[in-house]
Every structure is written in C-alpha cells, then in structure tokens.
Image: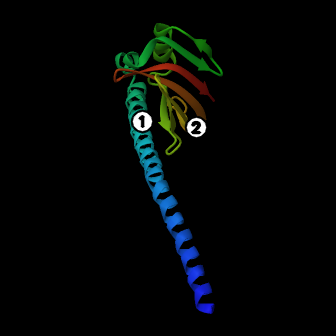
Amino acid sequence: MKYNQVDEFSLAAGEEMRRDVHGLMRIIPVALGLLLIFFKTSAQSKTLYQTIAELDSVFFTAYNNCDIKKQAEFYSDSIEFYHDQGGLITSKQLLLEATIKNICGKVTRELVKGSIEVSPIANYGAVEIGMHMFHNNQEKGQVPHASRFVVIWRNRTGKWTIERVISLH
C-alpha cells in the first residue's frame, strides 16, 4: 500500500510539473517579445538622443561663432522664444537681430555635460531639456552659473528645426 501512495504522489507531482512547463512555454514568447520591444525602444531613444545632442552642438557652435546664417537654418519661421528675463520673441528675424546685438562676441554658451534629456514627441519630433552656462566675454573673472533650457525640435522628413525655446536663468 505504501508503494501505491508514493506512486500516486509521483504521478500528481509529474502532472503538475507538466502543467507548469506548458504554462512557461506559453509565457516565454511573450517575454521575448517584450524584451525585443524594450531593446528596440531603447535603441531608438539612444539614436534620438544622439541626433538631438548633435543638433544642439552644431547649433551652439554657430551661436558661439556668430554664424547667423547657420542659426537661421535651425530656427522655424514660426519660432517662439521664451526668455525669463527678456520675454517672448515670435519673429525669427527679431531673434536673429537680438543675437547679433546682444550675443555676438559678448557671450558664449557651454553645455553642462551630462545634463541633456531627450524625449520623443510622437509624430512631431522631440523635446530637449538641459542645463547650460553662458560666459560673459566682456567681463573677465565673471563666474557663470548653470541655467535650464527646453527646446522643442520638429522633424519634417529628416530636417530638424527649433520650434520653441524656453530659456531660464
């Protein structure tokens, strides 16, 4: 009788194990699919981050070197530039003129390393958030402080433009 009890237990345990394996076999493809989606999304985010970081670098190289023509290529014709001290500018031409008057040869921008965050905006482009410092080239010894910025980038078939800027000092 004892032998039969052990035998029944072994059969029950074996059946339960088969059900567990069968359930696991159904879960594995779902888990693999989720992992693939995660890695694909992560790779796309990394590519988007690299794209925006490169655009930021090219734009601010033009900014620091007073390359107005290059800056103009980046700005949307419907630019909105919000500056906590200077207010709102909604004219591309006025923004470029203000840059010539107030920035060229006077100020250089330095990105705070590692501060950029980039998030996609579905069917539109991306938002870039970060920290930067502006060095006053007119006042030697002036110590810059980090300030925040937000840039809304629009992607039209591979051509990225700056649509909105929020600059906080």
Tell me how many marks there are. 2
Of residues 114 and 99, which is closer to you in this image?
114
| Quadrant the N terminus occupies | bottom right
Q: Which residue is mark 1?
A: 48
In this view, 154 is above or below 118: above
Residue 18's spot in the image, x, y percent?
A: 50, 67
Residue 78's spot in the image, x, y percent?
A: 49, 10
Q: Which residue is mark 2?
A: 144
Kindly state the secondary structure of the residue where label 2 is placed. Answer: loop
Of residues 130 and 135, which is closer to you in this image?
130
In this view, 17 is above or below 120: below
| Quadrant the C terminus occupies | top right
Residue 118's spot in the image, x, y percent?
A: 50, 36
Residue drawn at x 46%, y 8% is 93
Residue 33's spot in the image, x, y percent?
A: 43, 48
Kindly state the secondary structure of the residue where label 1 is placed. Answer: helix
Circle 1: is it few (<14), some (14-19), or many (20+) Cα within 10 Å? some
